[in-house]
Image (cartoon, rainbow, N blue to C red):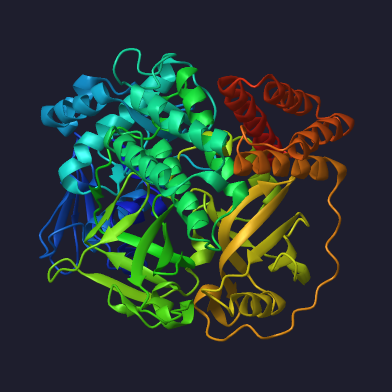
């Protein structure tokens, strides 16, 4: 009897179930002639006897976790892996039948609940049904010829089905205590997609939930009350909003978070912070950011009322952390930010097994009279290592947990250890979901995403590592205090590396310019579409001499960076910029307080949009000017929201 499940295990699948070091060592033992003598029983059980007297067995109808070995290892050992590899080589000989090809269009949704109960236990189904009743979001990736592994990304973990038709070879980064539950949830996600006829390689959907949770009118009273506060800011103007309104926004954000509406809660919290920044005359206040946050709240409210999946546009119903089993993370750099009273450092860590990016957050108070730049923080110890080392390292931890928003927390312990080692060439072997070698394909993938205003507010959603074949131009624009470099991939598709000056990292732009001029191999950062092209906000650069993390670099940034004149924007971009600036000014001044000059500016912007061919955007802006003249506050806020949502989305797609 041929074991199709063992033949389907690729080296990557074995590395996921054990680790890559064990796979390499087992293959080396096999090549050296130290492999086992194999005996296959009629029921499909595989036994192996090694030259050193060790015996191992792979029972029929069970996965690798059920394998037994006489050695002292408590978990998966090299003998078990070597037995799998030896069986694969034996089965590949002419007298044995060839390994069957995976079934085309296979879906884990084909497993029924009885099969799940037999393998995972009734307790796992009972726990999963509680989550199903509350509803949960899922992003599934169907198997393809290039990647035959079916995958489901849940709120706090990822589940991968390594062998078609087999529940014994499921890999998840969640700890063993919840492994069965999350596996059931992943199967049900595929089943829901199959029942709804959702095709495509990557699908986002809402699974389960209370009856009518995604129906029109399900926005919730808490969200309606929060929107009323946002409209008050819009009518009175951010420039005139006092501390009382900012405090009310903060309380409303807390209420939304308690109700499980995490994405609008985060937007409302950011809006309260922007109002506080304006009141304190801080440099981080940005009228354009205020306008976008107001539009985001309206967009999420409308999407929820229109029947969109609540967890996708309003946030998850649960904010629990999920403990992770032994994880391997590759650092992608660091971003330093903060306020006059505090500094923050976000270290971006790629989960190499699942192809997502997690964020490790740290915060420090700033002593009175101290600057506390990124260079000062670089020596602070995080997870037992200096921040400068951690931001460019491989991290292996047995005590990590992951939140629904992809924030990772690592606790110190005497038993569960965390190790930090140099990064090396890890970026070169990152999963395809993170490593971008084709910028044109990445642009198409970004185009397929929902609009930014209603996407889940997860940390590091679009952080990628981009392979660089050529750096064409580097320039600094003093007026904007921005460094921009045009880079290209091997096919010649361009992207712009764009970094703004930060007083918290004064030398970052000079160090970034030097790293780009040295001929980088890779750049890590947040990738977005802007005016029709790809823009990379860089976190780290990998050169031939090693990784460079600009935000942690020492120095005062005194180098003179020359730059050619900024290229004038194209007519469409100019028209959109003018319209967005007009709407942002209206939100800053207040719709009830607008001078005639602002209304005239909006009318001119509408005319410019119409001449540029953006007729629908022009119509929404014209409707706003008409609503402002009608002096109906409710109609004013609706018209402003419709216009700004349209303009932000058009600029993103442009």
Quadrant in the picture for residue 467? bottom right
Left or right of residue 647: residue 200: left
Most foreground residue, 497 or 35: 497
- Residue 318: where, in percent of width, then height? 27, 36
Residue 521 appearing in the image: yes
- Residue 397: where, in percent of width, then height? 27, 64
Q: Is residue 455 above or below residue 475?
A: above
- Residue 243: where, in percent of width, then height? 41, 49
Image quadrant in which the N terminus is located: top left
Q: Name the residue at 39% across, 53% down.
A: 353
Left or right of residue 556: residue 119: left
Quadrant in the picture for residue 347? bottom left
Q: Is residue 66 above or below residue 491?
A: above
Q: Is residue 480 above or below residue 357?
A: below
Q: Name the residue at 21% across, 57% down.
A: 76
Image quadrant in which the C terminus is located: top right
Residue 97 appearing in the image: no
Q: Is residue 107 above or below residue 401?
A: above
- Residue 137: where, in percent of width, then height? 37, 31
**How many numbered discs sit on the rendered protein?**
0
Most foreground residue, 261 or 289: 289
Q: Name the residue at 81% across, 73% down.
A: 563
Most foreground residue, 179 or 365: 365
Furthest toward the right, the residue is 611
């Amino acid at each position: 009897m041929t074991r199709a499940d063992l033949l389907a295990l690729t080296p990557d699948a074995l590395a996921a179930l054990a680790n890559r070091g064990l796979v390499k060592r087992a293959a080396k033992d096999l090549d050296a002639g130290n492999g086992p003598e194999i005996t296959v029983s009629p029921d499909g059980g595989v036994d192996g006897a090694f030259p050193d007297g060790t015996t191992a067995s792979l029972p029929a109808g069970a996965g690798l976790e059920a394998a037994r070995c006489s050695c002292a290892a408590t978990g998966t050992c090299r003998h078990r892996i070597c037995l799998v590899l030896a069986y694969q080589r034996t089965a590949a000989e002419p007298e044995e039948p060839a390994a069957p090809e995976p079934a085309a269009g296979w879906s884990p949704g084909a497993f029924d609940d009885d099969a799940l109960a037999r393998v995972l236990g009734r307790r796992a189904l009972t726990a999963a049904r509680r989550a199903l009743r509350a509803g949960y979001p899922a992003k599934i990736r169907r198997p393809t010829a290039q990647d035959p592994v079916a995958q489901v990304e849940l709120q706090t973990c990822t589940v991968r089905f390594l062998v078609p038709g087999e529940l014994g070879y499921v890999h998840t980064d969640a700890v063993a205590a919840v492994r069965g539950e999350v596996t059931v949830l992943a199967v049900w996600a595929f089943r829901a997609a199959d029942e709804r006829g959702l095709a495509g390689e990557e699908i986002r959907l809402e699974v389960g939930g209370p009856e009518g949770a995604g129906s029109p009118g399900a926005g919730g009273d808490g969200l309606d009350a929060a929107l009323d506060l946002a409209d008050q800011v819009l009518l009175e103007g951010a420039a005139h909003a006092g501390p009382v309104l900012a405090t009310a926004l903060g309380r409303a954000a807390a209420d939304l978070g308690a109700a499980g509406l995490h994405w609008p809660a985060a937007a409302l919290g950011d809006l309260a912070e922007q109002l506080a920044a304006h009141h304190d005359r801080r440099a981080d206040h940005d009228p354009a950011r205020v306008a976008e946050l107001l539009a985001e709240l309206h967009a999420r409210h409308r999407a929820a009322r229109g029947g969109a999946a609540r967890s996708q546009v309003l946030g998850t119903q649960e904010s629990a952390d999920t403990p992770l089993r032994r994880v391997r993370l590759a650092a992608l750099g660091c971003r330093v930010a903060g306020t006059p009273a505090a500094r923050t450092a976000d270290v971006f860590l790629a989960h190499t097994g699942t192809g997502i990016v997690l964020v490790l957050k740290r915060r420090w108070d700033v002593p009175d009279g101290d600057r506390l730049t990124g260079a000062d923080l670089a020596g602070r110890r995080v997870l037992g290592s200096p921040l400068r080392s951690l931001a460019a390292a491989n991290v292996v931890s047995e005590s990590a947990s992951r939140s629904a928003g992809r924030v990772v927390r690592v606790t110190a312990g005497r038993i569960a250890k965390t190790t930090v080692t140099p990064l090396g060439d890890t970026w070169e072997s990152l999963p395809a979901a993170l490593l971008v070698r084709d910028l044109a394909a990445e642009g198409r993938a970004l185009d397929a995403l929902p609009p930014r205003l209603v996407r889940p507010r997860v940390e590091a959603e679009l952080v990628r590592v981009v392979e660089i074949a050529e750096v064409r131009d580097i320039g600094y624009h003093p007026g904007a205090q921005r460094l921009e470099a045009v880079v290209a991939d091997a096919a010649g598709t361009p992207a712009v590396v764009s970094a703004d000056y930060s007083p918290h990292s004064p030398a970052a732009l000079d160090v970034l310019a030097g790293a780009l001029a040295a001929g980088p191999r890779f750049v890590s950062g947040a990738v977005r579409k802007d005016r029709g092209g790809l823009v990379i906000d860089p976190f780290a650069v990998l050169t031939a001499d090693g990784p460079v993390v600009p935000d942690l670099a020492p120095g005062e940034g005194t180098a003179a960076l020359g730059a050619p004149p900024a290229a004038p924007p194209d007519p469409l971009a100019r028209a959109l910029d003018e319209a967005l600036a007009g709407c942002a000014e209206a939100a800053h001044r207040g719709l009830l307080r607008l001078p005639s000059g602002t209304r005239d500016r909006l009318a001119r912007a509408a005319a410019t949009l119409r001449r540029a061919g953006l007729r629908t955007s022009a119509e929404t802006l014209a409707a706003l000017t008409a609503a402002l003249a009608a002096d109906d506050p409710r109609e004013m806020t609706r018209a402003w929201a419709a216009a700004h949502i349209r303009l932000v989305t058009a600029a993103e797609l442009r």
